[in-house]
Image (cartoon, helix red, strand yellow):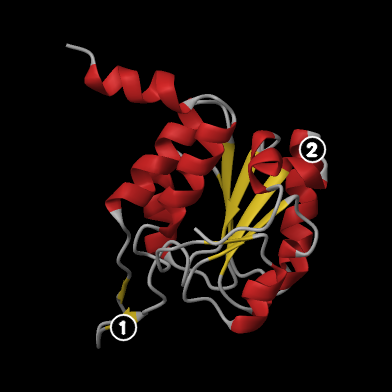
């Protein structure tokens, strides 16, 4: 995972992880059929990483520029209650989350893939870009994942946060108990 100096120290402070959807939770493909249905593909390990992170007490939120029933469904399946859709200016939803949970910028991580994410990425303590993000987005990131959006990038970040905060070992041990 290409990362800049201090990433693990910043990850120790994270209390909220914010995700974009298309290109981060998915590979960025939007499949539409003739009936008006929309299809998206989510990576199961990304979802499990988000569940483990929330179980450990780190909040997760979604801020996306599009609106989709599929996103609502996936968020519900994962237990994510803070979902902001149709956000032209993602800073508005970001400020609501900071106020709602009494957080400062340093306690927030954001995973993005394109320039629409930069207004929030430029504010958070841990800005992350997926490996197939735009070059401009990668420039603003302290961390660029090895995996692509929708293909395990989110899991890399959840594991990093859990490990940096000393929470991984207990979670892992729950799975290997006899």
- Mark 1–mark 2 Cα distance, whole angstroms, equals 38 Å
Percent position of residue 46, x then y:
37, 50
Is residue 80 visible in the rendered image? The answer is: no
The image quadrant that residue 144 belongs to is bottom right
SS state under label 2: loop
**Viewer-closest of 58 and 177:** 177
The residue that label 1 is drawn on is 32
The residue that label 2 is drawn on is 103
Percent position of residue 153, x then y:
43, 59
The residue at 74%/63% (across/down) is: 120
User: Which label sits on residue 104?
Assistant: none
Q: Residues within 10 Å of mark 2 (few under 14, many from 20)?
A: some
The residue at 37%/62% (across/down) is: 70
The residue at 31%/83% (across/down) is: 32
151 relative to 35 in the view: left or right: right
Kindly check if marks 1 and 2 are in contact, taking CB atoms under 8 A apart as contact.
Answer: no
Percent position of residue 108, x then y:
70, 46
**Which comes before the other along the chain, label 1 or label 2?**
1
88 relative to 44 in the view: left or right: right
Percent position of residue 57, x then y:
56, 26
The image quadrant that residue 135 belongs to is bottom right
């Amino acid at each position: 995972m290409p990362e800049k100096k201090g990433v693990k120290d910043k990850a120790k402070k994270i209390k909220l992880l914010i995700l974009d959807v298309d290109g981060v939770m998915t590979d960025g493909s939007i499949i539409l059929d003739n009936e008006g249905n929309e299809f998206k593909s989510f990576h199961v390990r990304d979802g499990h990483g988000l569940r483990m992170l929330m179980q450990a007490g780190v909040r997760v939120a979604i801020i996306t520029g599009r609106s989709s029933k599929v996103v609502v469904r996936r968020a519900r399946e994962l237990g994510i209650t803070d979902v902001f859709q149709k956000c032209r200016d993602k800073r508005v939803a970001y400020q609501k989350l900071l106020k709602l949970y009494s957080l400062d910028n340093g306690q927030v991580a954001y995973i993005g893939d394109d320039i629409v994410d930069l207004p929030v990425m430029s504010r958070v303590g841990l800005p992350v870009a997926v490996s197939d993000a735009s070059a401009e987005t990668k420039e603003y990131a302290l961390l660029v994942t090895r995996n692509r959006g929708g293909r395990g990038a989110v899991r890399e970040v959840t594991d990093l946060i859990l490990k940096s905060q000393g929470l991984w070992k207990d979670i892992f041990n729950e799975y290997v108990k006899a």
